[in-house]
Amino acid sequence: MKVLIPSALRSYTEQAYAEAGGDTLAAVLAALDRSYPGIRFRMIDEQNRIRPHIRFFVDGEQVFDLARRLDGVQELVIVQALSGG
């Protein structure tokens, strides 16, 4: 599937889109990490939870569960909130 990479993580992929496969969100993120080592840790913490500043959208619907099935999904959008002052 096509994965939109936020600008803050493009240092890993060097492009706005990547391709990754998997039957769950967790599997897609693992596939991304095999292609782009270290990218998963920027999105998922040591307790295997989605980091608070990361959002995943599957075909336009926000997903909160890494076990979410992705059968037939065309696009995964990763959104990273930025903060500063």
Image: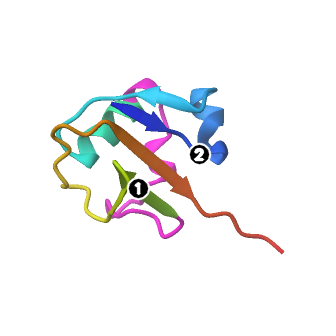
Q: Quadrant of residue 73?
A: top left
Which residue is more in the foreground, 11 or 20? 20
Where residue 16 sits, quadrant-wise, is top right
| In this picture, residue 59 sits left or right of residue 54 | left
Q: Amino acid at mark 2?
A: Pro
Label annotation for residue 66: none
Picture disc at residue 6:
2
SS for callout 1: strand
For label 1, the crowd category at 10 Å Cα-Cα, with few meaning under 14, some 14 to 19 and many 20 or more, is many
- State left or right for residue 4 relative to residue 64: right
User: Does 85 sit above or below residue 26?
Assistant: below
Amino acid type for the residue under numbered disc 1: Phe
Image position of 53 (left or right of 68): right
Which residue is painted at 45% across and 61% down in the image?
55
Report if residue 43 lies within the magenta region. yes
Q: What main secondary structure does the magenta stretch of the protein show?
A: loop
Q: Earlier in the sequence, mark 1 or mark 2?
A: 2
Residue 4 picture location, percent across and down: 50, 39
What residue is shown at x 45% (from left), y 47% (from top)?
A: 77
Residue that mark 1 sits on: 56
Nearest to the observer: residue 78 or residue 35 = 78
- The quadrant in which the N terminus is found is top left
Where's the C terminus, which quadrant?
Answer: bottom right
Badge 2 density bin: few <14, some 14–19, many ≥20, Cα 10 Å:
some
Secondary structure beneath label 2 = loop
Q: Position of residue 63 (x, y in %)?
A: 31, 61
x, y (%) of residue 54?
Answer: 49, 61
Residue depicted at 50% across the width and 40% down the height: 39
In magenta, the rendered stretch is 34-53
Give 21 or 71, whichever is nearer the viewer: 71
